Image (spheres, rainbow, N blue to C red):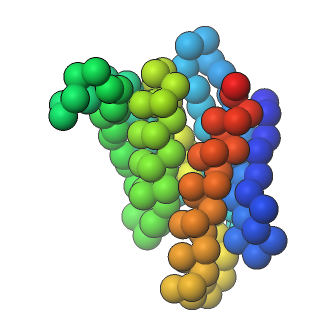
Amino acid sequence: MPLVRTGSVDFGLSAQIEEIGPDLLVIVTGGPLPHIGAVAAATPRKSLADPAKTSASTSVFCYVGHKEDEIARFLAQNLAARLKRKVLVTAGMHWENLTPEGISQVEAQTGELLTAILNSLT
């Protein structure tokens, strides 16, 4: 299972990538207490705005008290649309007393993680 990481020391993210036939499973963790906080499943489809482009429909489940749903949704939706394959993302990261600035850093790492995942698959 390939593993990719973002470069942030304080708020870095890791993604384990498993290709399951034509589908993709991505397990995203970060911080000292990895877990499953949210799950997003995406399937590619023609864009409603431009049928010549590929988009994705995404369903998300987030456990009570967790906030990883937006990260899981972003990664699943973008990976499914760009790779044109079904994608399941689990996301669970935890840092004690995370500040708003820390949250912004984690969100920025999500874009870097998407790029690292795409690069690892090409």
Q: Quadrant of residue 24?
A: top right
x 63%, y 45%: residue: 115
User: Picture coordinates of residue 54 (x, y %)?
Assistant: 35, 26
x 45%, y 66%: residue: 67
Q: Is residue 23 visible?
A: yes
Q: Quadrant of residue 25?
A: top right
User: Picture coordinates of residue 102 (x, y %)?
Assistant: 60, 81
x 42%, y 40%: residue: 77
Q: Is residue 98 left or right of residue 60?
A: right
Return the residue found at the far left: 49
Q: Is residue 92 left or right of residue 62?
A: right
Q: Quadrant of the N terminus?
A: top right
Q: Quadrant of the C terminus?
A: top right
Q: Is residue 56 above or below residue 84?
A: below
Q: Is residue 59 above or below residue 51?
A: below
Q: Nearer the viewer, residue 44 or 54?
A: 54
Q: Is residue 109 above or below residue 101?
A: above
User: Picture coordinates of residue 51 (x, y %)?
Assistant: 23, 22
Q: Is residue 97 left or right of residue 64?
A: right
User: Picture coordinates of residue 91 (x, y %)?
Assistant: 56, 52
Q: Quadrant of residue 64?
A: bottom left
Return the residue found at the far top: 21
